Image (cartoon, helix red, strand yellow):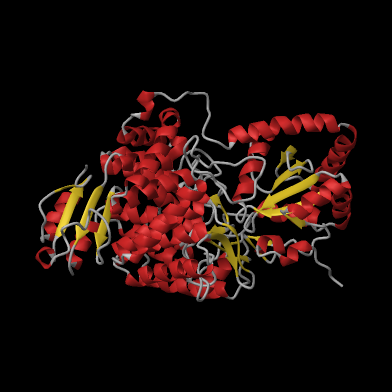
Amino acid sequence: MTTTNRLAQESSPYLRQHADNPVDWYPWGEEAFTEARRANKPILLSVGYSACHWCHVMAHESFEDDATAAVINQLTVPVKVDREERPDVDAVYMEAVQAIAGGGGWPMTVFLLPDGRPFFGGTYYPRDRFVDLLRRVDEAFRTNREGLEGDAAQLAEMVEKGTGLPSLGWAADGDAAAGSGTAVVAEAAKGLVARLDREWGGFGGAPKFPQPGMLELLLQAWSAQPADDVLEAVTVTLDAMASGGIYDHLGGGFARYSTDRRWLVPHFEKMLYDNALLTRVYLHAWQVTGADRYRQVVTETVEYLLSAPMRQPGAAFSSAEDADSEGVEGRYYVWSLDEVVSAAGTEVADWYGVTAGGNWEGTNILWRPVRGDLARPAVIEAGRRALLGRRDERVRPGLDDKILTEWNAMAVAALAEAGAVLERPDWVAAAVQVAEFLLGSLRRPDGRWLRSWQAGSGARHLAYGADHAWLVEAFTRLAEATGEARWIAEARGAADALLALFWDDAEGGFHITGNDAEALIARPKDTYDGATPSTNSVATNALLRLAALTGSDRYRQRADRVLEVMAPALAKAPMAFTGMAAAAGLAAGTVEVAVTGDRPDLLAAARAPYRPERVLAWGEPYDSPLWEGRTGPEHAGLAFVCRNYTCAAPTGDAAVVASALGGPR
C-alpha cells in the first residue's frame, strides 16, 4: 500500500510530486520548525519548481530512494518549498547559498538551524555525495554546534545586507541621482551592444537565456535615439531565437533557455512568464521594423498560451510545462528523419533541418536553418499541421497547473497590449476574462490579494510585491486596450495596496513581502533584473504609467523615490538593472494621448508606433487631467497629444496623430 507524506495536502503540483517520496517531507511552516527544536535536528530545506530538470534528477536519485530517504529522515527535518509559490523563502536562502558557494540555482539545498538560520548550502548533489554531506552535517551539528551557530550568525547578517537595496561598494551622490534617464538607458544599451554575440545574438555564451528585459531596453534606447547597432542587437537575437530549437515551430511558444550558443538545444520546459514577456518584445520589434516574421511569432506564441493546457477552461493560465515526458527530457518534441518524412514529406524535413544523424543525441530538434525565414509556404504549413497532429498523439509533458497572480498579470498585460496594437479583439477579450478570474478567485473578501490558486485547493499564500506591481501594469494596459474606466480603478486599488503593504518608509523601495506576512530571517527586497524584471523595476514602471494616466502625484513621488535610491546602482552598473533603467527613461518624460468619441482611426494611429513612453486614455472618462474639459460634445472625435501634460492643438486627423508620435523624441 502506497503511503503519502504531508505534501499530499498542498496546492502546489511540484510539492505534490513529492507526496509519495519515502522522505518525511514537511511543507514550509511552524510545524517543521517546532519538530526541529523538539528533535534537536537541523532542517534540510529543498527548494525547486515543477519544470526544473535537475530538480527531477535529484528527486529520482535521492528523494525516491528508500536508503537515502532513511538517512534524511534520521538526521534532519526535511522541508520542501516551491520557489514559485514562496519567492520570499527562495530569495532569502538563495542569498545564503550564493554567499556560501559563489553561485546558486535549483534545486537549492540548504541546511538550517532549528531557528531558520542557514549554515550551509548548495544546489544539486548526486546521491552518494548527498548522503556523505548529510552525515557530515549531522556530525558537525552534534559536535561543533558552537561553530555552526557562528557561521549561521555571519550568514544571517550577510543575507540581511544582500537582500536589501544594492550595496556594491559605491555611495549615493547627488550627481548620480540627478542623472538623465535617457543617458542611463543609452549607457545600458551601449554595454549590451558591446556584449552581443554578433553571430547568434544574445549576450554572452552558453547557456543562453532570452533576456526580454535587455531586449526591451535596447528597443527603448532605439526609440529615443535610433542607431543601427542597437536595433541590430535586437533583430539578430530575435531572429536567432525564433529560428532555433528554443522556439516550438509546431505549437508556438519558447522554451526556458538554450544549452548552446545557437539557441538550438533547449531545456524543453516552457514557462508562462517567458512567453508573456517575449510576446511583448516581438510585438515591439514588429512595431519598430514592420517585419511580418515578428508578428507571426507574436501570433503563434499567443495561440500557444490560449490553447490547452496552458489556458485552463473558465480560469487563467497554468504556470509551466515540464521538459520531461515519460521520464525522458525532450521526448515530446524530438523527431527521427523517418517520422518526419512519413508524416509530412522530405520537403518539410529539409525545411526544419531534419537529418538522419540528428542534431541532438541522435534525434532532431526542429529548427529553421535559414535564419529569419519563418513564413511557411502552403506545403510546409500543411506539413507543420501534420506533424503537430502526430505530436498530439504523444504523451504530453507534465503540467504545473497552479495559477500565479504575478505571471497571469504578465500575460494579461501582454494580451491586452498585443490585442490592441494588432487589432485582435479576441485577445483583448481573453485578457479581460483572465483578469476577471484573478479578481474573483485570487482576492479575499477583505481585498487582500493572494499568490497562488489551484483547482481543488483554491487560493493560498499572501500575494507579494511583484504580484501587486504586475497587477497595476495589467490593469492599466487593460484600461488602454478596452477604454473601460473600471480598470483604472482596479489599477489604483492594486497600487494603493502595493504602497500600503510593501513600501519601506525608512530607506525607500519595495519589499518582496507585505507588512502582514510571516517574518523570515530577513525581509528581502528584489532589485536585480534577471529572467523577470524585479519587483522594484515593475513597480516603478507601473506607477509612472499610472501616474501619467491619472495625474496622481502620490504614485509619481514613490516611483521617483525608488529611482533616487537606485540611482547610484544605475550609474555604476545599468546592465544589472535593465528594468530600472527603463523606468529612468520613462521618468524622463511621458507622452499622454487622449481620444474622445468613437474614433477607431485615431486610436489606431496612436497605437501603431512603438512609443514606450506613451499612455492612452479613451472611452469612458475617469478622474484625470487627461479628461479635464474634454468630455463635452464639442470635443468629441478629437485626439489630444501631450508631453508631460503640455498639449498640442487637438486634432481629428489621424495623420497628424501619427506624425506627432512617429519620430524620435
**Residue, far front:** 446
- Answer whether residue 131 is visible to the viewer in this image: yes
Seen from the viewer's position, the closer of residues 241 and 555 is 555
Residue at figure coordinates x 47%, y 23% from the top left: 171
Seen from the viewer's position, the closer of residues 251 and 41 is 41
Q: In the rendered view of the protein, which quadrant contains the C terminus?
A: top left
Residue 68 image point, x, y percent: 85, 52
| Left or right: 108 in relation to 37 | left
Seen from the viewer's position, the closer of residues 502 and 224 is 502
| Left or right: 603 in relation to 141 | left
Residue 55 image point, x, y percent: 69, 53
- Disc tally is 0
Q: Is residue 408 above or below residue 166?
A: below
Seen from the viewer's position, the closer of residues 530 and 459 is 459
Residue at figure coordinates x 34%, y 60% from the top left: 488
- Answer whether residue 402 is visible to the viewer in this image: no
| Left or right: 242 in relation to 517 | left
Residue 342 image point, x, y percent: 54, 73
Where, by quadrant of the figure, is residue 480 drawn? bottom left
Q: Is residue 572 above or below residue 632?
A: above
Q: In the rendered view of the protein, which quadrant contains the N terminus?
A: bottom right
Residue at figure coordinates x 42%, y 62% from the top left: 412
Residue 338 image point, x, y percent: 57, 68
